[in-house]
Every structure is written in structure tokens, then in C-alpha cells.
Image (spheres, rainbow, N blue to C red):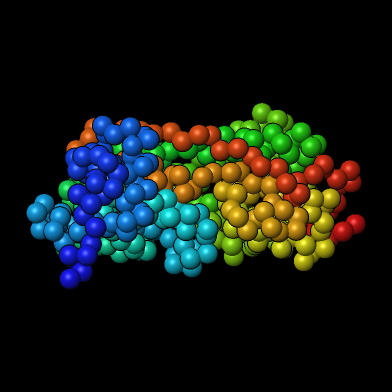
Amino acid sequence: MEDAARPTIADVARRAGVSKGLVSFALNDRPGVSPESRARILEVAREMGWTPSLRARALSTGRSFACGLVIGRSTDVVAADPFFHSFMAGLEDVFSMSGQVLVLAVATPGRQETETYRGLAEDRRVDGVVLTDLRADDDRIALVASLGLAAVTLGRPDGDSPFSSVSVDDGAGIRSAVAHLAGLGHRRIAHVAGPSRMLHARRRAEAFTRAAADAGIDTLVVETDFSAAEGADATRVLLARDERPTAIVYSNDHMAMAGLGVAQREGLRVPEDLSITGFDDTDIGRHLFPALTSVATDAREWGSVAARALLDALAGATPTHAELAEPALIVRGSTGPAPQHHPRGAGRD
């Protein structure tokens, strides 16, 4: 009885006043439909509660109609980092309307990660995957290709790849942060970076070093695993230096918020004694006191664009390399003019 009550493509077509073929193209995110028609068809489908019959489609095509996202970080980091929540929401925005199921797995990089990809492919649990946190000489690209899976990478790999990619210029955001702080008179700026094995963390650190050198600024880079705990530890190390930095550029908001808490607990005023910038402009950072200056990226859009690229790959399209808009620095209360004194160690003078 449930199948009889389920709205069909024909029902959606009648309500929207278009052909079944046009509805099929719109619901499967295929070309040949004007933006206005696509939006109207999707709205009608939502109003009617239309959902694809995955069982029928899987039987007729031999596909699973599922896409995988394997994240090679600890579950604690994934659970706490708002970037992944927004990114997955973007994937779901597209997959839910095209009849794809998102399969999420968190695996330790190395053997466990390799076995996870093999299991997804051999059990035919997914048709394609999104590759995140690209690494130097990333062996997952060859592995996924050998397994016959479609894929899209977040960022451009540093080697050959048969897959589409969706990228954003991380360096632009970091350069904006350095320029902003230099313009405020800061001359000792530190960077709390992510793991150098990850290409986007490495590119942010390299952009920071180059931008600071061009501005004649003294710098120090501390590497972390992107977690709040290591961000806090890195902040303690920096603030304990004889010549502590007057500003710290963090590679994500998660660490910046932890660093803000460390600084305030040690008696420093933000931004009077220490300026802080983050990266990703997560919602919670806007509600801190002081509100966090951060590089704004649209993680949800990144997820949506990546999902569409993966669907195109599954349809046999030629690989493409999409570049999202450059991230912009959103200035708030956590940054201010460099202090006129030159304190030694943590705590107020």
C-alpha cells in the first residue's frame, strides 16, 4: 500500500504542468532543464513528498545508489568540527533529491582506511566516493580508481588524478588574515597549523609564511592535528615564549576558539593584548566574546558542488575542476591594533 500511495514522476509532472521526461531530468540533476523549470519541479516534488524508489532503480541498473564519504580523522575531531556538519548537509541537499544515500565512515589513515574503501566497493555499498583531506602523494586516488569507483576530490591533488575536483584557494584567506593583522601594526604573528601531511593544511601554512615574509613580519608555525585540544596546547606553548606573538592565525575556528579560551584564562585581553583569527567562519564563533575574526568559507556549498560533480561522474561526464569563490576575511572583535608594549611571557604586564 505504501508504494501505491507514493507520488510518482507522473504525478509530479501533472502537478507541475510539464512532461515526465523533464521531471526525470530535473530530479536527477541532468542538463537540459532551465534553472526556473528545475526550481519549480523540485519545489513541487518537495510539496508532494516525492521520494525515489531506490529498490526499483537498484534492481534495474545494478547500482547501489549510494555515495561514500570516508573521513580519515579521529571520531572526536569529526564530531566536534562544524565544518563536516555543514559539508555533509551540502552533500545531502543534492543527494536527497537525486535518490542517493550518503554512507559515512570514519577510519584511521592507513590499513583501516584502505580496508574501508575496499569493503565499500567489494560489497557494492557505494557507487562513488568523495575524497577529503588530500595528502601528499595520496595513494587513495590510485586505490579508488583500481576499485572501479567514481570519485571527486576536495582540492587538486599534487599528482595525476582521473577524478573531478572541487577546490577553494585556502591561501587567499590566510593572506587576507596576515594583511589585516599587519595593517593593525602586528609584527610578531604565529600560525597554528594543521598536519603538514594534508595538502590544504600545508598550503595554508605556506601561504602564511610567504605573506608574513613579504610583510617583513617575524613568524612561528606550530603544527597540530586540527583538534581543539592540540590548538589549545599550541597556544600555551606560544604564550609561554619570552617574546610571545601579538597575534595568532589559526587554521580552523575550532582551534581558534580553544586558543581564545586559553589566552583569557591566562589573563590576556583579546584583542588588547592578543589578536586571534580563525578559518571557516563557523556559526558559534560569531557568538563568542569577543566575536571571532575568521576566514569565511561556504562548507555547505562545497558539499553541494562536490555532490553534483560526483553525480556527473557517475553519469559518465568528463572530469572537471571547479574553483569556488575565494574565501573572505570577516573582521570582528577578536582582532585589534598591536599592543604598544612588548610583553614577555603570558599574563598581563
Tell me if residue 299 comes above or below residue 215 in the rendering.
below
Q: Which quarter of the image is occupied by the N terminus?
A: bottom left
Residue placed most toward the observer, 154 or 309 = 309
Viewed as shown, does residue 40 lie left or right of 253? Answer: left
**Residue pictured at 26% horizontal, 32% vertical:** 32
**Residue pictured at 50% horizontal, 34% vertical:** 325
Residue that lies at the very extreme toward the top in this rendered image: 214
Residue that lies at the very extreme toward the bottom in this rendered image: 1
Which quarter of the picture shows residue 339?
Answer: top right
Q: Position of residue 197 (x, y in %)?
A: 44, 49
**Residue pictured at 77% horizontal, 66% vertical:** 265
Q: Position of residue 323 (x, y in %)?
A: 43, 33
**Number of numbered tags placed on the structure image:** 0
For the question of whether residue 16 can be seen, the reply is yes
Viewed as shown, does residue 161 lie left or right of 271? Answer: left
Q: Position of residue 295 (x, y in %)?
A: 61, 43
Q: Which quarter of the image is occupied by the C terminus?
A: bottom right
**Residue pictured at 41% horizontal, 48% vertical:** 303
Viewed as shown, does residue 239 lie left or right of 317? Answer: right
Residue placed most toward the observer, 223 or 168 = 168
Viewed as shown, does residue 264 lie left or right of 190? Answer: right
